[in-house]
Image (tube, rainbow, N blue to C red):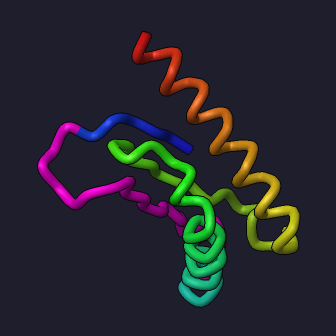
Amino acid sequence: MHMTTRTDPGPEGPVVGFVVSKAVGNAVVRNRTKRRLRGLMASRISGLPGDCAVVVRALGPAVSVDSAGLAADLDGALATAQRRLVARTR
């Protein structure tokens, strides 16, 4: 996961993008993985800084993890990305 501060005059609020490579699986599996991640991020986006851009990169094991495990991994990655963003802006 990568998080940065946006400087473009784009939409208000945080922006989130997803990267799911072919290594994760076929198109059906990749799209299912993106839908799962998108659903999890929808409930977490309000906790992100308003001027940030986030890129979530799904790795192969994301396919076999249950929703609770995927949510825990996402929360950990978000916390790490926010700490790194704060450290870079100091």
**Picture mark count:** 0
> Is 64 situated above or below 4?
below
Whether the magenta-drawn stretch holds residue 19 is answered as: yes
The N terminus - image quarter: top right
Quadrant in which residue 69 is drawn: bottom right
Whether the magenta-drawn stretch holds residue 11 is answered as: yes
> Is 68 situated above or below 85?
below
Q: Which portion, as a residue range, is magenta?
A: 7-26
Quadrant in which residue 15 is drawn: bottom left
Residue that protrudes farthest toward the left in the picture: 9
Rendered location of residue 75, percent (x, y): 72, 50
Apparent side of residue 60 relative to residue 3 in the rendered image (left or right): right
Rendered location of residue 77, percent (x, y): 68, 43
Q: Residue at x 61, y 76 (%)?
A: 39
> Is 54 situated above or below 35?
above
Q: Residue at x 56, y 70 (%)?
A: 42
The C terminus - image quarter: top left
Between 85 and 19, the one lying in front of the other is 85
Rendered location of residue 9, percent (x, y): 12, 49
Q: Residue at x 60, y 26 (%)?
A: 83
Residue that protrudes farthest toward the bottom in the picture: 28
Quadrant in which residue 16 is drawn: bottom left
Between 73 and 31, the one lying in front of the other is 73
Apparent side of residue 76 relative to residue 44 in the rendered image (left or right): right
Rendered location of residue 76, percent (x, y): 75, 43
Q: What secondary structure characterizes most of the magenta part?
A: loop
Apparent side of residue 66 relative to residue 71 in the rendered image (left or right): right
Between 32 and 26, the one lying in front of the other is 32
